Amino acid sequence: MSGDAKVRWGWLKFMYVYTIAGAGGLGAGIIAAPEVMKSTLGFPCQDPVIFGITGSVYLAFGLLSILGLRSPLRFAPVLLLQLCYKSIWFVGVILLLLVARQFPTYAILPAAIFASYIIGDLIAIPFAQVLAPQPAAGPRARPGEA
């Protein structure tokens, strides 16, 4: 195994741990103690249903990332989805707010954290393997055939 491959596997596992701690921890906090999380995060009041959906999605990312520690390549699509939605948020929300000069100060920390996930995912995800075409499945034997 080349040094490059070791770094890639290390990055993959690091991003799973980072996702477990960051997204999983935040999601668990939002689900278990939403009022505490709202006051701690300093965000404006949010609809409890939408806040709960956000917490559920973050917790799901954390839980799926636990599986990613066991099978890093098989669960790379979890990181790919994370990369996609955070990049879309960055361009579709943060960039537009910056252009309109309406960027709120409370968004600095989430933007910095999302940027760290985007950069980490871009480094960690082995795009050549994840996006490679899958071999065609051969004919399956029918039950009773050997």
Image (cartoon, rainbow, N blue to C red):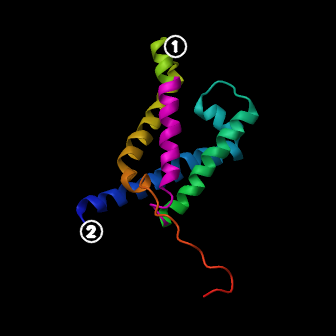
Residue 85 against residue 91 in the figure, above or below:
below
Q: Nearer the viewer, residue 49 or 80?
A: 80
User: According to the image, label 1 marks what residue?
Assistant: 102
- Asked whether residue 90 is drawn in magenta, I would say yes
Q: In this rendering, would 39 be left or right of 120?
A: right
User: According to the image, label 2 marks what residue?
Assistant: 1
**Residue 29, percent across and down?**
64, 45
Local crowd size for mark 2, using a 10 Å CA cut-off: few (<14), some (14–19), many (≥20): few
Q: Which residues are magenta?
A: 71-93
Looking at the rendered structure, the kind of residue marked 2 is Met
* Residue 140 in view of the camera: yes
Of helix, strand and loop, which one carries label 2? loop
* Residue 110 in view of the camera: no
Q: Residue at x 60, y 88 (%)?
A: 146
**Residue 52, percent across and down?**
71, 40
Image quadrant where one finds the N terminus = bottom left
Q: Residue at x 75, y 34 (%)?
A: 48
Of helix, strand and loop, which one carries label 1? loop
Residue 6 against residue 97 in the figure, above or below:
below
